[in-house]
Each structure stands twice: as C-alpha cells, then as structure tokens.
Amino acid sequence: MSVSSTDTSLSNFRARQVVYTALRRPGLLAAVVFLFIIATGTIWPQLLTSYNPIAADPLQAQLPPSVVHWFGTDQLGRDVFSRVVHGARYSILIGVSAVLIAAVVGSILGLLAGLARGIIDEAITRFLDVVSAFPDLLLALVLISFTGPGTFNLIFALGVASIPRFARVVRAQTFVIAESGYVEQARTFGLTPTVLVLRHILPHAMAQVPILATIGLGTAIIGAAGLSFLGMGPQPPIPEWGAMLAEGRNYLRVAWWIGVWPGVAITLTVISVSVLGRQWQAAFEGRRQE
Amino acid sequence: MDVENVTALHQAPVAGLQGRFWSIRATLLSQILGRIGSGIIVLWAAITLSFISLHVAPGDIVSLLIGEQIRTPAIEAAIRAEWGLDEPLIAQYLSYLWRVLHGDFGRSYILQTDVATLVLSQIWPTLKLTGAALVVAVVFAVVSAVATAGLRWPRRIAGGMELVLVSTPSFWLGIVLLFVFSFTLKLFPVAGDRSFSALVLPALSLGLSLGAVIGQVLREGLERALEEPFALTVRSWGANALTLRLRHGLRHAALPAVTLTGWLIGNLLSGAVITEQVFGRPGLGKITVDAVLGKDLPVVLAVAILSAFIYVVLSTLVDTLYLLLDPRLRART
C-alpha cells in the first residue's frame, strides 16, 4: 500500500516537473508543439489542409502567398502549403526508417563486438573503420548507384551509411557494462549467459541508443532531403521536401515561395528534434543544460 | 564518431612494440609509422570493399559496369578484356588493386572516357569550393567562439544561431542566398564558375553549417581553457582579454576542434556534391550525380576511393601532428 502511494506521488512529481520544465524553457515547449503539428501532418494531413497536394491547376500557377493559398502555388498550380504538409509523411518517414535501420543493425553489431571480443570484435571494428572512411552522404550515393533511385533505396542507403555511429557507442558501452561489478556478481549467482546478456547487459548497453537516434534523426532528415534534392529519392509528383526544393530552385527567379517553404519546414523540424534530443541527453547525463 | 576513430588508431598498432629500453625518439617514430600503417590498411580495405561490392551486387558485372549505356558485343568484349573477367577472381582482384594503385580507374562506358582523366579534370573547381568553404567555416568558428566564450548572453545568442545553422540544410541556405543576393540584389552571379565572386555564395552556404559545428566545439574548449590556472597567470601579466583568448586560450581549445578535421573534410566533400548542383557549378559533384543517376559505376567508385584516400591522408596527418604537439599522448605504457 505504501509502495503504491509513493508511486503516485512520484508520478505526480514527475508530471509537475514536466510542466515546470516546459514553462521554464519556452524553446523546448515550442519544439514539442511543432513536432506535434508535424506528427499530425504525417498521420492525418487532411486535418491541416483541404487541398490535394498533387492535383495540378494551370490557371492557378505561381500565385504568391495569400489568404487562399497560404504558401502560394507552384509552377503547376498546386497548393504549396498542402504539399509541405503532405510532404511531412515522406520526409519524416524516410528519416525515421533510416535511423531505425541504423540503430537496430548498429546495436546488434556493437553488442556482438562487445560481447564476443577477440577476432570478431577486431573484424567488426576494422569494418566500421573502413566504412567511416567514406563520408556518409557519399557512401549513400555509392549504394544508390547500385540500387537505383527511389524511396526504399534511399532509406536503405542512408540507414547503412549511419550504422557505424550506433555500433561504436553500443560496443563501448557493452565493454563497460560487461566488466562492471553487478554483472560479475550476477555471474557468480550462476545465471546462464543468455539471461545474463538479455536481462543484465543488453538494457544498459543500449540505454543511449534512443538518445543517439533522436539526435541522429535530424542528420538523417537533412541527408534524406539532400539526396532527394539530387533526384535520388521519391520521384515526382510525390511532395517530398528535398524534391520540392529541387523544383523550387528552377523557379527562384519568378516564384521564391516554391523553394523557400519546404526548406523552412526541414529546418524547423530538425531544430525541434535537436532541441528535444539535447534536452534528453542532458537529463540522461544527470545535468541540466545551463 | 571520428574522435573515437582517432583513439582507436592510437592504441592499436604499436602497443606490443614498446619496450622500456626504447628511446623516446624511437617510440615516437614507431608510433607515427604505426599510424601510417593503419591508414594504409584502411585504404586497402576501402579499395577491396569497392571490388567486392562490384562482385556481390545483384546482376552481372558487365551490365553493372556498362550502366545505362547500350550493350553491344564490342563494348562487352572491351569490358571483359579491361577487367580480365575471364581470369580467376584472385587475378582480377590483384590486377584491380594494381591498377588503382597506379591511378588507373578504368573507363567510363557512358562518357566514353578514361575515368582518372575525367576526375582529374573536374577536381580543381571542387577543391576551390571546399577550400573556400573551409576558410568560411574556420573564420566563423573562431570569431564566434572568441567573441562569445564565457559571456552569458552573447554565447546564448551565438549558440542559438549555431543551432539554426546546423539544422539548416546547406543547399536550402544556398537557395535562399541565391534568391536574396543574386536574383533580388543582383550582387553575385547566378551560376557557373567564371570569377571569384561566383565562389562567394557557394562557399558561404557550404561553410557556415560546418563553421557552426566547429564553433560549438571551439567555444566549449575555450571556456574550459579560460578556467585553467594558466589563464590566471596570463591575466596577472596584464594581458587583455583578447590577447588571452587569441594567443593562449585558442591554442588549447583548438586541439579537440582539430580532431574533427577528418569528419569535416568528408562532410565538405559530400556537401560540395549538393552545393555544386544548387549553384550550377562544374566539378566532381556534377560528375558524381550524373554517374549515380546513370549507374556509371567506374566513375562512382573512383570518386569514393578518392575521397577515402583524402580522408585517410588527412586523419593520419592530424594524428601525427597531435603526437608531435602534445607529448602526453606519446608512449602510454
């Protein structure tokens, strides 16, 4: 009974703490609100805009921003606001999927290297060294030159290119955890290696992965937009932010709004994600930022 | 992540060679040789990886190398002869290694030209752009770190600006700069690489976000350095704050920032690919994008190996410099 009452007071305390943090840090609050809007755009874009993002209307082409078309219309008369909202789905999902691939494969490689040690560790570490000798984006380009452009190929290429980042951290953590006193003690209790790894090493070795993933998400979204800008990602008329920027670049002289708004969306999303990730990391490291 | 890479390079190669009887000079030399050795191994593995990727990729190797070019028996015969496809795999591998070491990256069958010649002819505009961007990045970082380190509000503002710059895709920054300075104010040319003024906007859009990253690292290092006892000593000589920061603090703060060099150059090179596209500049980026879209693998692999080479050379150089500059890193037994 006493346990449950401490529990509720603890969760009350946590909830109050969250509210206080939000009020004290307006930047954090803004980031959360913006990401909430982006999430809405990803899941249910019709809630935010009634225009069809790919229906062309030549009579309405290249209209500047107005009350009717908040962000103006593009060269084919499509509503730019609606394209930006619907584009969230592609840009965010590409970024999230790429990070997921990198986090899962990277964690497995890191755990394997950290637990097996010896020759397997050496092989994995050397492999990661070689892969990181290629700049991320260039490695993704090399992979795409084998697979060809497209949404799934882009996710795959970006994901593979960011594996080393996760693998390195998980490997280092696994080393530390496996050496620590409590694992040693658990071993003397006669736990089987499976239980030891799954219940005692894995959760702690992976503790930082979600934080790394949040911070890496920003990089992944920028990388995805860059590769789509080059024509390596979703093909027209899909309203992906990077691809929209590529179209907007060609109409800059006559209609700046086509190329400006998708970039604003990318930048604000990445800022929000980084603010959130940094806050989380600071909390994890047990110190508040400033 | 490359910070860890560097430490991995420290520890691996020479640990077994160190004996107490070795003179310090010999230890230093062997450490440097060890770094160079592991650099060569990474490079060799990178070349091997690109050879393997050609062979494990789905589809047969002739159509991979041909790309979007039309396949004729004559071209097929030429490819078979050039890559020695009728010989055993190990012979193919050794001859590939031999050719790459001699700067021969084969032929591009789409562009009908020698890949090495093509890459060399396009490398200058890209080097110019990356060099200029590096200058922009370093100047921005040093100014922003020196001017704001340790000051409450200025560092908040600079930190916010850096967050925005880091989060802005460089190519979008390029588009905005183009719109404001080329189309509206007509101060800079819209495209091409004919004059110095054509370099300004591309260098800014490529360099600023990296400058923001280095700026953050530099400021953190500078703040740490300013709290050290030596800062107090320098101040007691009557040196003013700027001298303290520029002549004494920056030297200490620069070490962690220099560690980023390898990562930085890689980032600049791949960023240049996109920046060149935004500003319609000639260079490696343009041929890379064309090659990727046309599946012109000889060109893509040549560019990849070249950039790995640049990365390895630079990070080995930085590591060696470190050893020479900071005696604490030598001989750790």
Image (spheres, coloured by chain):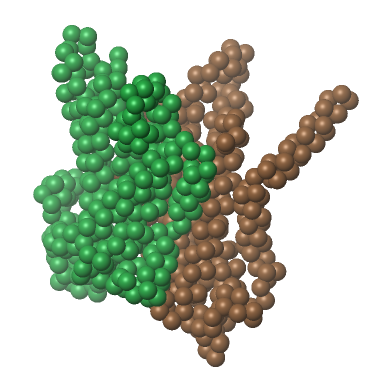
Chain colours: A brown, B green
Q: Left or right: where does residue A8 sit relative to residue A226? A: right
Q: Residue furthest bottom?
A: A59
Q: Quadrant of residue B200?
A: bottom left
Residue positioned 82% across, 32% down in the render: A9
Look at the picture and state if B164 lies above or below A67.
above
- The spot of residue A224 in percent (x, y) is 45, 59
Q: Left or right: where does residue B272 sit relative to residue A273? A: left
Residue positioned 43% across, 64% down in the render: B172
Residue positioned 57% across, 36% down in the render: A290
The N terminus of chain A appears in which quarter of the rendering? Answer: top right
Look at the picture and state if A131 lies above or below B32.
below
Q: Quadrant of residue A247?
A: bottom left
Q: Nearer the viewer, residue A7 or B124?
A: B124
Q: Nearer the viewer, residue B269 or B88?
A: B269
Q: Is residue B245 visible?
A: no
Residue positioned 30% across, 42% down in the render: B262
Q: Residue furthest left?
A: B102
Q: Residue furthest front?
A: B238
Look at the picture and state if A65 lies above or below B27.
below
- The spot of residue B310 in percent (x, y) is 23, 46
Q: Nearer the viewer, residue A180 or A146?
A: A180
- The spot of residue A202 in percent (x, y) is 56, 30
Q: Is residue B93 visible?
A: yes
Q: Left or right: where does residue A199 sit relative to residue A97? A: right
- The spot of residue B210 in percent (x, y) is 37, 50
Q: Residue furthest right?
A: A1
- Total marks drawn? 0
